[in-house]
Every structure is written in C-alpha cells, then in structure tokens.
Image: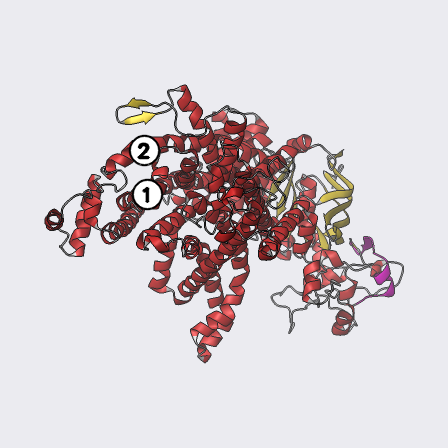
Amino acid sequence: MTGAPLLEVEHLRVEIPTRRGVLVAIDDVSFSIAEGEVLGVVGESGAGKSMTGAAIIGLLEPPGRIAGGEIRFAGRRIDQLSGEAMRRIRGKEIGAIFQDPLTSLDPLYTIGRQLTETIRVHLGLDGKAARRRAVELLHEVGIPSPERRIDQYPHQFSGGMRQRVVIALALAANPRLVIADEPTTALDVSIQAQIIALLKRLCRDHGTAVMLVTHDMGVIAETADRVAVMYAGRVVELGPVREVVRNPQHPYTIGLMGAIPAIGARRERLLQIDGSMPRLAAIPEGCAFHPRCPQVFERCRRERPELLPAASSAAACWCHGERPGKAADA
Amino acid sequence: MIAFILRRLLQSVVVMLAVALIAFALFSYVGDPINNMVGQDTSAQDRAKLRQELGLNDPTLVQFAHFVGRAARGDFGVSYQYAQPVARVIAERLPATLELSVVAALLALAVGVPMGVYTGLHPDGWLSRLFLALSLIGVSLPTFLTGILLILVFSVILGWLPPFGRGDVVALGWWTTGLLTLSGLKSLILPGVTLALFQMTLIMRLVRAEMLEVLRTDYVKFARARGLPNRLVHFGHALKNTLVPVITITGLQLGSIIAFAIITETVFQWPGMGFLIVQAIGFADIPVMSAYLVLVAFFFVIINLVVDLLYYAVDPRLRLDRGGAGAHGH
Amino acid sequence: MPSIPGCDWIAAARGRMVTESEGGAPGAFGRLLDSDLFWSFRRSPVTVAAATVTAVLVLSAALAPLIAPHDPYDLASLNLLDSLNPPAWRDGGSWSYPLGTDDQGRDILSAILYGTRLSLEVGIASVAFAMAIGVTLGLLAGYAGGWIDTLIMRIADIQLSFPAILIALLVDGLTRSILPHEQQDQIAFAVVVLSIGISGWVQYARTVRGSTLVERSKEYVQAAQIIGVHPVTIAWRHVLPNAMGPVLVIATIHLAIAIITEATLSFLGVGLPVTQPSLGTLIRVGDKYIFSGEWWILLFPAIALAGLALAVNLLGDWLRDALNPKLR
C-alpha cells in the first residue's frame, strides 16, 4: 500500500462503566486501513468488532466511551472531536452500513426522501438535482426501475433490495471509508453473495476503503485484502487474507479455520474449541485465550502478548516470542 | 381497505347492540317501565291501558326492537328526577360538557406534546426532571382532588376565579356557549385545567417514552451515521415515528376525557352530562342512566372507529397496496 | 489444513475454563439484596422515601383500632356538641381531637386512620377480585383456544376501549339500582369491590393469556398432556407460576389505580357511605365546608389521600422501570 494509511487506530481502549465496575470492551486494539483497501474484522459475537466500528464513527452507545488510544483519519485525529465536527465527517468521509436492512430504514419515509435528504445535506444539491442523483444511485446498486421505486416505502422492498438501498445511502456522499457491520448476516444465503459482490464492485469503482466486520470467515476470504481476528476485545491476529486463511498463526485462528468444513478435505470431525469466549466481566489474566489454548505456557497466564511477527502476518501469541514454540504446519 | 372498514363497522354495530341490550334490560326490568314514561299521578287503569298500548305485554324481542327504534329517534322516555323527556334534559346539558371537553383536550395536547418531545430529547436536563416530577404528581392525584385543591387556592384563598357553575352563557340556537362572555371564560379555566391535567401528563409521558424508544432505533442510528444534522434526525425521523402511535392513543384518550368530565363537573357543579349522570345514579333515575349508557357507548364507538381509520391513513405499512410489495427479484 | 499439535484438548480446556462465578450471597434473601432490583431501589432516594411513606401509612392503617384516639364508627360516642372543632393548635381546639372534628362530631384523625384502612382494604380486595377473574379468564382463553378465546378477547378489547372509571361508575350505578335502597350502605363495600374488580380484569387476562400461549407450546406441557395429566392441573401447576411475574407487576400498579378509583367513587357519593367513610367520603364531606371556614375537614383527609396515592404510584413506577428489560 502506498502513501499514508487512511485510517489509523492506535491502542484503542473502550470502557463501559457499569454498577459492578468498569468493563473493558476493547483493550489496546491497533490496526490501520489504507486507501481503497478492504480490511476484514472477524470474530465471534461479543468480541468487540461492532464496537470498534461504532467507536471509529463516533456512535458508541452510552455509557460506553473511548477511554484511551487514538483514531486518526487521513492524518487527522477524530476520536476527540466535538459532536458537530464528527457529524460532518459521518456520511461524507466515513460511511456505515448496519446489519438489519429492515430496521435501518425509516418505515414512514419513502426511500427517495431518505436518499435526497442525505444527498442534500452533504452535496448541497437542490430538490430536482438531488432526486436525479438518487435515481442514479439506485441504478448503480442494481434496483430495477429506479424512477418508479424511488417513491416506495421500505416495507415494499425485499431484504436484498433493502440492503442495496442501504448501501446506496451509505455511499451517497462518496465517503472514503465505509464501515460495513455484518452487512449480509440478516440476508438469505443466496443473496449474500450478490450483496458482497455489489459492495466489492462499488468500493473498487469509487476507491472506497472498507472495514468489513463479520463473523463469517468465508465472506472475509472472498472479499478482504487483509484481516484482523478479534477475541475478547483484542486483536489476536492481523495479516493478509491469504496468509491468515492458509497459514494461521494464532491458536484461536487455527481453531476457527479448523472449524470450517472444506470440500475435499479428509477429516472425520470438525475441529471444535472447547469452552467459550469469556464474558467481559471475566476476562482472564495474561492472554485472554489461555484457558482454552492447547499450547498454553506459564507465560501465557501472566503476560498478555502483543502482536508479534509470525510468518507473513502477526499474531498475539507467545509461541512467536523468544521462547521456542511449535510452528503451525501447513 | 374496504374489508377493513366494513369489519370495523360491523364490530361497532355489535357493540352498540350489546350496550342497547343492557340499557333495555335496565330500562324495562329495573323499576317499572310505565313509571319511566309517565308521571306518578296516572291512575292504575290508565297504566294498564298504556301497558297494552305500548306493547309491554309483547315478547321481549319485540320490545327490544321497539326500544332500539325509539332510541334511534332519540326518545328515551321521561326522567324521574326532572319529569321531562330525557332527550331534552340531555340536550340542555350537552353543550356544557362538549365545550369543557374540547377545551381540555386542546389544552392537554398543546402542553403535553411539546413537553413530551422536550423531555424525550433532553432526558437528563433539570427542566425535564422537573416536568417529570410534576407529571408524576399530576398522574397520581385523583382528578377530584386536583379540582378541589385548585378551588381552594384560586377561589377560596386568592378569590381570582369562580369555584362553581358556568358563568353567563349565550344561546346560539339550541346551543349555549360560555366562550363569549368573560364570566363564562373565567369559569372555564379551573375545570378546564383540572380535566386537562391528567390527560396532559399522560400525553407527556407517552410522547416521552415513545421518543426515547424511537431514538434508540436502528434507523435513527443509521440517520446519524449518514451525518444528518440533529434537526432532521430529531424533528424529521424521530418525531414522525413518535407521533404515529401517539395520535391514535390520544384519540382514544379523548374518550377518557368524557369519563373524567363526570368527576370534574361534579367538583365544579358544572351543568353538564357528567353531573347529570352522577345525580341520576344517586336518584336511581333509570331512564337517564339508560340513555347515558347508549349515548356514551355511541360516542366511544365513533371515536374508536375514527382513530382506527386515522391510524390506517398515517402508517403506510398498513396499506397493503398491490403496487410494489416485495417480490421483484433481487 | 493445520492440525493442533501435541496437547490433550480436553484436559487443557477443562483445567482452565473460566467458571461463571459471581460470588453473590447464597440464599434467596441474599440474592434479593444483591439483585439489580434492590440496587435500583437503593439508588433512588425518591423511591425509598415513597416506600417509607407507604409503609408508615399502611402500618398506621393496620393498627388503626389500636392507635386511633376514637372510634369514628361508634355512633354512640359521637357528641354533636364537639362538632366542627378546629385542630388542636388553634383556638377552640383540644388535644383530644388533634386534627379537629367534622359536622357529626367525628374525630378527624381517627377518621383518617380508619379511612386509610378502608381505602387499603377496598384496594386490595378489588385487585384480588380483578386478578381472580382476569387470571381465570386468561388461562381459559389461552388454554382452550378456539371460540372461547376469541369471545373472551373480543369482550376484553371492547371493554378496553372504555375508560375504567366509567365502567366502574356504571357497574356501581347498575348494581345500586337493582338492589333495594335500604341495604345500600351495608353492602357498599361489596358493590365498590365488584365495580372496581370488573373494571380492571382485562389487563390480567391478556397477560396471562399471552403467557399461557407461550407455555402451552413448550414441550413439558405437551409431555404432560400426553401422559394424561388433567388440563386444570397443568394450568395450575405449570403454566400459572410462569405467568405470575408480570401479573404481580400489574397488580401493584393496579392497586394505586384501585385506591384512586374507590376514592373517586366515594367522592361522587356512590362509593363508601358516610357511616363507613373512606378517605374519599371524608373529602366529600369536607368539600361542603370549603367556603364556610372549616378547612380542616377537607385538608387533612386530602393530604392523607394524596400522600397514599403518590407513594403507591411512585413505587409502582419504580417497579415497572426496574423490571422493564428494555430500559436496562
């Protein structure tokens, strides 16, 4: 990737104060996204992927708050901006797509109205021009007969169509980065592929970078350039997609890959990692994964590993530290 | 759409008939129907003759049919207490109740909705907390107590406003109005506020609750993620979605104004239908009670019907038009 | 595909699995103290104050026969010469009638204590009555289904479109017109409980019906049905306990409404009579003297009623918020 990264997240820490104490939802997370790059963020439910996206775009639900670290967009720090300044960035520079297209659209407004209001806020066009642009956008995302459907209500569209509308809305002002939070999870499997293909094509055409948050490794493998694997609010592996998928370096990632059925592979049983991801209130000392790790050492229980270089990517595992560990085999 | 209206109409008719049945039972079997219709001095012979003439020896179903027929024409017999046709007694008092109710309803809406929106948008502000505390008192205190306390303060202690009655009224055809005289207006204030208070607080809390819930929806989140300014998010999307259920519930609340008018009229000796029915119950004035039953049921049925139609008109999701529902491919 | 080298998965996982321990106190009471409910209770001073006021009122009402200086029902003990006495701290008052007397010579303080007691008794009885009807009909509707369900729910819907106070008033009026005039005072209590009960059963029925429908589709119920357990037993033993939670919340809120409704009915003259006055009746009496200067007959019962209504409402409000999963 040439040039400075578009988005830089450094040592991000998000806390949620509750009556039982402060929960750390995101603990020292760092990564970056270059212009036009697709970064996949993968992990189980509750690993902190969505919250990272929310923190970046400034829509953390209170009482959650950013308690440390920096987020820089195009070199400029954005994690401490005022509400109004952040609002100007949203939609125009950073867009977002959420999981459920039905609830993402206001049921009482036509999609045309929702499109034109977004266009007018960011591009300053008048009514007619905004509407023209809206029709163009709908056409671009593959809605048939856009001039007619622009005056319809969200409930008159099918799930896949709705998500296309949502994508159109997110890209309306041509943002440089789009945070897509589980964009296909709520859709039928047959439609998922179409939506992912659409997203990929549009972002390539417009040069938009994407932070693709999902728990579906298959989507990541197909779409992303790089991938960050998250576990219990931390990044445990980070690297180019091909490398991480073929040659995972962190025991958790290894487990994830092993749990995917592969056509043609000879194996009697899918690999299963015993136990489950710890709750926020009970994250273990040291490496968060050590209770479930088959290769745990004393050090893992005491010290939390940072991202260490491992093969062609990076993994937060002491196996890759000075202590000799076992190499994961191909 | 037509099916919907027809179904509701049918339901309304059934309800009316059921109520008419109760009223009829009351009229015919509790107390002597002859007494309901003629004065006390009629001789026994005349009564027997009347009994025959009026078909009181006919089968019950026929009598019921006659009752319904008479009710439809507005003939409910003669009041015990006033020795006048019930219809006349009610008609004299109807304007008083209607004026009071409409003024109270308008007041409740004019104050309740804005207060609700404000406390929904600024849930933690001191002003919101104040409004909420006051509203809690408004909801907890029984209406008659509020009325009495208002009389105590404004009539007994301060002597600013009249405690009883309607003041001077002006007759316009068969309608009498207190809105055109100063004393009439002054008399309207305390009862109006008393009647409105309960509704006002209810509306305020309802609007606030709806607003808070709407502000947490995905479409509001998405609207913010698109960078829409607060003005559009709050007073466009949020407000419209808040008001839809509020409109309908408010319409239904209009009905309860009629009910609470009974209490308010009693406290202020306002010469309306509410005061009438209380006296009638105390006096066991069957014709009046039976007429009131039918009238009130009619009124409620109309209100419910209108509100249902209104809901239909406002929420596009309920209008299942054939034009473009869902299945248009992906 | 890589395979995990060496380790025994199971031993590794078991030995290090994070256990779900909260470390709370054992026992039901301990759990109550530690629960979210109690925490939100402690956190809100207003709620604590409301609970205290309610407790004081309830206690004094319950102990009325013991702590009241006079018995307001004992007509023989009333002395007309003592009527219309002002409260003790004003001229003409005496400490044997601390808050003054009404037009019949009744001691206001005693009347308030007994009146509060009556208000609470009517309130609780009405709620119990409404609950009984509502829960039974709800179970019936949910369990039997079919036309019974439709019928009950239709009636419920229709009744819900009328304000409860109106229904209570009309039931009251109807009952009174049916009954002979002389007995009205004696059975006023029953009439009022009946009226408020009938006006309030719907919410219980709806909630219980909902719970019943949910439970009925669960496998343990189907299993019981297959074994041949009688439907009533199933309903009573299995379905009902699961439905009771929300029912109790409704009951608490309903109690406040019932107290206010009774007060309103009494104020209008169709509730409890003067010979057995509740707080509403006392206010009705006091209302007549509002201009002639004997303000104490009105004010003290009014304060008592306002306090009771506010306190119970605040408690109900807090309970509803605390148990509402959406607001957490």
Q: Residue A177, can we see it?
A: yes
The chain containing the residue under callout 1 comes to B
Secondary element under disc 2, as helix, strand or loop, is helix
- Asked if residue C202 lies left or right of residue B141, the reply is left
Task: Name the one closer to the observer, C67 or B75.
Answer: C67
Residue found 26% across the figure and 38% down from its top: B82
Q: Position of residue C2 (x, y in %)?
A: 73, 66
Secondary element under disc 1, as helix, strand or loop, is helix
The chain containing the residue under callout 2 comes to B
- Asked if residue C83 lies left or right of residue C269, the reply is right
* Span highlighted in magenta in the image: A295-314
Q: Position of residue A234 (x, y in %)?
A: 75, 53
- Asked if residue B56 lies left or right of residue A329, the reply is left
Along the polypeptide, which appears first: circle 2 or circle 1? 2
Task: Name the one closer to the observer, A273 or B74.
Answer: B74
Q: Magenta segment: does it hold B244?
A: no
Q: Magenta segment: does it hold A302?
A: yes
Q: Position of residue C248 (x, y in %)?
A: 54, 58
Q: Which residue is mark 1?
A: B280
**Marks 2/1: CA–CA distance:** 13 Å
Label 2 is placed on what type of residue? Answer: Arg
Q: Position of residue B202 (x, y in %)?
A: 50, 40
Task: Name the one closer to the observer, A119 or A222.
Answer: A119
Relative vertical location of residue B275 with respect to residue C134 in this rendering, above or below: above
Label 1 is placed on what type of residue? Answer: Ala
Local packing at callout 2 (Cα closer than 10 Å; few below 14, some 14-19, many 20+) is: some
Q: Which residue is mark 2?
A: B93
Residue farthest toward the front in the current orientation of the protein: C81
Q: Is the Cβ of the residue at disc 2 closer than 8 Å to that at disc 1?
A: no
